[in-house]
Image (tube, coloured by chain):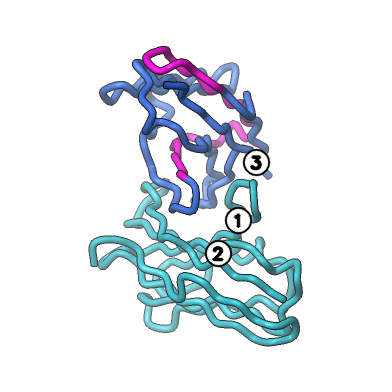
Chain colours: A cyan, B blue
């Protein structure tokens, strides 16, 4: 596709429910990143994939957060037993990868609201 | 880990004037410095980037300067227009491609 696509655009869930957020990276992009952006803040790194390998998950705030990219393309970020503090915009980005520091291109994000 | 400080946090500029946003970083291994623009409710958009082997880069009304010795870099926007109003983030990635965003600058262009 033309850019990074994320779905759903908005998600409302009750506290305690599980949610799954999807990211379709730019075709051919090797690297995929997830970020969390709280209201009025900059994006904060959650996790990073190179193809299907999750190379860094140091930013995941708890073991309730899980990300996967089983075929090296589409990625899913899953949050179990959601809490109110999980409310944020979840951004996905992709880059060509292959060498350090290729430009990262972001999707529009999923705005998650936990009631 | 990397620490990026950005200032000012808010900036109001008369249309047509210039705007300057400054950032400092801590990790001397950083060698790639992108700037992102984010309009309300929209995705962060890469507007310009610079690598550590150059000191300045220009793209039309936007320029970025880098001082590796002092560990600071700046974004310059000339001839500002209303559509430049947005939040701007400097970024200093760690060597494993993890981006560390600055705290953001809310730029308002006054018509």
Chain ID, mark 3: B
Label 1 Cα crowd, 10 Å radius (few <14 / some 14-19 / many 20+): some
Chain ID, mark 2: A
Extent of the magenta region: B12-39
Q: Is residue A14 left or right of residue B25?
A: right
**How far apart are the two marked residues, 1 and 3, measured between alpha carbons?**
18 Å
Circle 2 sits on which residue?
A90
Q: Is residue B14 magenta?
A: yes
Residue mark closest to the camera, 1 vs 3: 1
Q: Report whether mark 1 lies on the same chain as mark 3.
A: no
Q: Is residue A46 left or right of residue B36?
A: right
User: Which residue is outermost to the bottom?
Assistant: A17
Q: Main secondary structure of the magenta part?
A: strand
Give the SS element for disc 2.
Answer: strand
Give the SS element for disc 1.
Answer: strand
Q: Please state the horizontal and vertical placement of residue B35, each as a whole percent of the image.
A: 45, 36
In the image, is residue B82 above or below residue A61?
A: above
**The C terminus of chain B lies in which quarter of the figure?**
top left
Q: Is residue A35 magenta?
A: no
Give the SS element for disc 3.
Answer: loop
When asked about the image quadrant of residue A16, the answer is bottom right
Circle 1 sits on which residue?
A37
> At x 36% / y 56%, what residue is drawn?
A95
Circle 3 sits on which residue?
B2
């Amino acid at each position: 596709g033309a850019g990074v696509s994320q779905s759903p655009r908005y998600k409302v869930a009750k506290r305690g429910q599980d949610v799954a957020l999807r990211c379709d990276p730019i075709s051919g992009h090797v690297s995929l990143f997830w970020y969390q952006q709280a209201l009025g803040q900059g994006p904060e790194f959650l996790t990073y994939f190179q193809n299907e390998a999750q190379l860094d998950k140091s930013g995941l705030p708890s073991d309730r957060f899980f990300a996967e990219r089983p075929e090296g393309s589409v990625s899913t970020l899953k949050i179990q037993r959601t809490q109110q503090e999980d409310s944020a915009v979840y951004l996905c980005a992709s880059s060509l990868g292959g060498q350090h520091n290729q430009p990262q291109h972001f999707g529009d994000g999923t705005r998650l609201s936990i009631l | 880990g990397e620490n990026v400080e950005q200032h000012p946090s808010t900036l109001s500029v008369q249309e047509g004037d210039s705007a300057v946003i400054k950032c400092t970083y801590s990790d001397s291994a950083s060698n790639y410095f992108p700037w992102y623009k984010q309009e309300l409710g929209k995705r962060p958009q890469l507007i310009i980037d610079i690598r550590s082997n150059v000191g300045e880069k220009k793209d039309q009304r936007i320029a970025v300067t880098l001082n590796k010795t002092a560990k600071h870099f700046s974004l310059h926007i000339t001839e500002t227009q209303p559509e430049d109003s947005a939040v701007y983030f400097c970024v200093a990635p760690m060597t494993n491609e993890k981006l560390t965003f600055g705290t953001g600058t809310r730029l308002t262009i006054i018509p």
